[in-house]
Amino acid sequence: MHDTKRKTIFLTSFHPLISRNILMGEVFAMLAEAHRIILLVPRYKAPYFEEHFSGPNVAVEAIDTKLTAHDLFFRKLILSAAPTRDLSIKRRVEFYRDRKIFSYLVSVIPAALFRGKKWYIRLLRALDRRTGNQTRFSPLFERYHPNAVVSTDVQNEIDVAFLRGAQVRGIRTVAMVRSWDNLTSKGIIRCVPGKLLVHNDILKGEAVRYSFIDPGIISVIGIPHYDRYKKAYDAFHDSAPSRAREMKDAFFTALQFDATKKLILFAPFGDRYIRDNRTDILILETLSSLDLNILVRLPPTDTVNFMGFKSRRATVRFYESGSSAWRGGKKINEVSATDEEHLIKSLAAADVVVTGQSTIAIDAAAFNKPVVIAAFDQEPRSYHDSVLRYFDYEYYRKFRERSGIRMARSPEDLRAAVKSYLINPEADREVRIRIVKDQLAGFDGRASERLVDQIASVLNGY
């Protein structure tokens, strides 16, 4: 029998990064210590979650994540309702690639007529609620009688189904916005929870502006998994210089790097983002013209084919993150604790970080490491086939304009930027400070605590 004093929480984990963002850190440990957790995961990944996250107060439930026709239909409507630049660019890119005029008109006409209209969004939510299957997960609700449903990804369709199921039963709900681009690139929020948790004031503003969420139910908490980065950063920089040098040397030795040379951490774009991807190879070739160490951190949920790349000058090592024990390709990989620890060590040891439109730029800023964004293609391309479009997405345009982050527009520009940062690593420190302030809500190492406190306040009826 379980402790009847404990509250029962349904906690979702349907996106590959949730295990890294929420389950590996203090949030999950604190929740499991105080409450009974029913961890809702994709059926095909259940053995993985059983192995890594089950415990005395944790039950893992395998969920069928196949989307219904209703989900797919409302996904299209939801995407058409948000008046963001990201979605406008995506629609034009889709038409550029497949030339299906009817599909394009079906997507752009509702967007042109109704997007950003409060009455239309309310109507969509009402229709969604009235026509959806509210009994889909009834057996689970009847078996566990949860006190609250905590959604870790408010825009995930399966999360939406659990939020809807909770609301029709009068069960309290808490939901989180998963990532910095979600509110501008994934449409409006379908199901409004009792409490919405966001990383920063930028996301709070987007939730109010595009999804018409009452600001009174939104709380800014920071980013929980960055608490680990804060502790690692403090530990590295608070150590005696000799100890810090020791840690860096150990990392270099493990990767067989030359300890007398600087280290570039390179996080590629990935093949999902670039058709016939040769841009990542060009970036690596450009960096390899310098006499230094290069660590290429391959994306955990994507592929990059470097075709047996070898450098005559630089020492290049590749780290493949992401792990899976199921079929389905890298897109559904989970990030392991080992991957996360290696990333932290990589950031602490790096002298300069090079990437595309990745959140690695925020990671680097958290470690006060200079960042260069590679913003060019391997060959001339039309705008809708170019990496340049990603930097025009609304979330990213705000990011680069507010931060002033360095954008390399050519291989020559990239080489020059990296060399200048290697000579003067303190240059543009104010850029990193702005990124931390904007994206990490203070970066005080207490985001996990705030998240748990918000869940506790909902459980207690506040």
Image: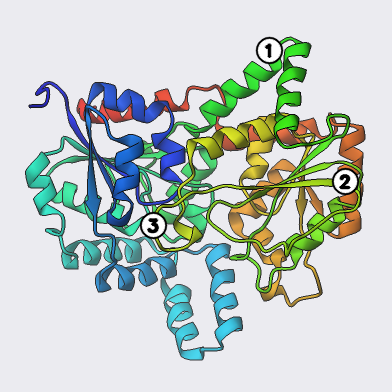
**In the rendered image, the vertical position of residue 456 relative to residue 52, given as above or below:** above
Q: Is residue 390 left or right of residue 105?
A: right
Q: What is the secondary structure assignment of the residue under circle 1?
A: helix
Based on the displayed image, in which of its 4 quarters is residue 39 positioned? Answer: top left
| Dot placed on the residue nearer the N-terminal end, 1 or 2 | 1
Determine which of the numbered discs, if any, sits on residue 326 in the image: 3
Residue that mark 2 sits on: 417
Amino acid type, callout 3 = Trp
Residue 269's x, y, as percent? 66, 58
165 and 308: which one is in front? 308
Q: What is the secondary structure assignment of the residue under circle 2?
A: helix
Residue 25's x, y, as percent? 43, 29
Determine which of the numbered discs, if any, sits on residue 238 in the image: 1
Amino acid type, callout 2 = Ala
Q: Is residue 355 left or right of residue 421?
A: left
Q: Residues within 10 Å of mark 1 (few under 14, many from 20)?
A: few
Q: Are marks 1 and 2 in contact (CB under 8 Å)?
A: no
Distance between the Cα atoms at labels 1 and 3? 41 Å
User: Which residue is located at x 89 percent, y 50 percent?
Assistant: 415
| Dot placed on the residue nearer the N-terminal end, 1 or 3 | 1
| Dot placed on the residue nearer the N-terminal end, 3 or 2 | 3
Q: What is the secondary structure assignment of the residue under circle 3?
A: loop
User: Which residue is located at x 25 percent, y 22 percent?
Assistant: 34
Amino acid type, callout 1 = Asp
* Badge nearest the viewer, 1 or 2: 1
